[in-house]
Amino acid sequence: MTLTLPAELARQLTTGLLSFPVTHFDDQGAFDEIRYRDHLAWQADFDVAGLFAAGGTGEGFSLTSQEIDEVVRSAVHEVGSRVPVIAPATGGTAQATAQASAAQHAGAAGILLMPPYLTEASQAGLIAHISAVCQVTDLGVIVYSRANAVLEDDTVAELAERNPNLIGLKDGVGDIERMTRTYAKVGDRLIYIGGLPTAETFALPLLQLGVNTYSSAIYNFVPHFALRFFGAVRAQDKDSVYGMINDFIIPYVDIRNRARGYAVSIVKAGLTAVGRDGGRVRPPLTDLTIEEREELAALIEKINRPS
């Protein structure tokens, strides 16, 4: 399989919305490849710029390295010729570098480097960790700044200078000053991806800071709405953006905020609500209650109703 050059991947990812599909499990909690591949084929039927396998919405944190490899290979085989597939690298440095190498062998187009597991780290330690992953692969790497791996502007600048294949920063913090400092210092050397839960809420304000695309979880189950929303953001159509935020995003977020971990659970429930069987989440996440699922289904029906 032909290697996707980092610069080409960066260019591609900025052309449209980014898909972060759920990972399907069977009744015993094992990876369900058939349902997963069917879902990816449906996701790739729409106009998206990249597909991130086993990311946060895909419960990558609950998958073993072997399962991540299986999920990535399934995604590459199913849709890799149509949409760039970005694989995760998770955990500590040894695990993350091994997963990055495996992803390149599996034919992935790039890497999303997740925060290290559990432990806090200094900025110098994060530079060493991120650089180690960049150095074991020829693929473009996007680093996810959130949780215990929040990157300061000087850190991002040093990483970009050290690592030519570092192509992007995904922001999961939403600190306007930090993003302003980072963009002012690094500019268009990197691409910037919105990565806060329900990223649509922040998409229009962050557009001014160079964050011109984002990870859409709702694209999993309402792709037409998600793409219409993205188009309104790109056009800076404030009336349309805030109309859709009032009609769907805010009540959706209200359900999501009722329990920790619902940012993933609500997406699988949304898939089931539209007749595509998202299935259950793995522990330690919990599924929506029956009442919450009914409330979500009514909300989805409202926005899908012909105007």
Image (cartoon, helix red, strand yellow):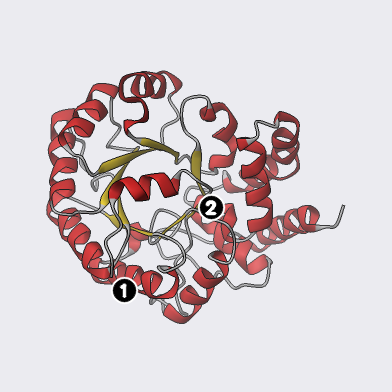
Q: Is residue 42 above or below residue 116?
A: below
Residues 242 and 232: in front is 232
Q: Amino acid at mark 1?
A: Glu
State the residue at coordinates (23%, 46%).
116
Write down the residue under mark 2.
217
Residues 193 and 276: in front is 193
Whether residue 294 is visible, yes or no, is yes
Left or right of 80, for residue 160: left
State the residue at coordinates (13%, 35%).
125
Disc 2: CA contacts within 10 A as few (<14), some (14-19) or many (>=20): many
Q: Amino acid at mark 2?
A: Ala
Asked which quadrant contains residue 11, the reply is top left
Whether residue 113 is visible, yes or no, is no
Disc 1: CA contacts within 10 A as few (<14), some (14-19) or many (>=20): some
Left or right of 134, for residue 273: right
Q: Percent from the top left, x then y, of residue 128?
A: 12, 38
State the residue at coordinates (28%, 70%).
1
Q: Percent from the top left, x then y, of residue 185?
A: 31, 20
Q: Is residue 233 above or below residue 306?
A: above
State the residue at coordinates (62%, 72%).
276
C-alpha separation, residue under disc 2 versus residue under disc 1? 21 Å
Element marked by disc 2: loop
Which label sits on residue 70?
A: 1
Element marked by disc 1: helix
Left or right of 237, for residue 32: left
Left or right of 227, for residue 244: right
Marks 2 & 1, CB-CB < 8 Å contact = no
Q: Percent from the top left, x then y, of residue 181?
A: 36, 18
Which label sits on residue 161?
A: none
Q: Percent from the top left, x then y, of residue 172?
A: 41, 37
Label whose residue precedes the other's in the sequence (2 or 1): 1
Asked which quadrant contains residue 147, the reply is top left
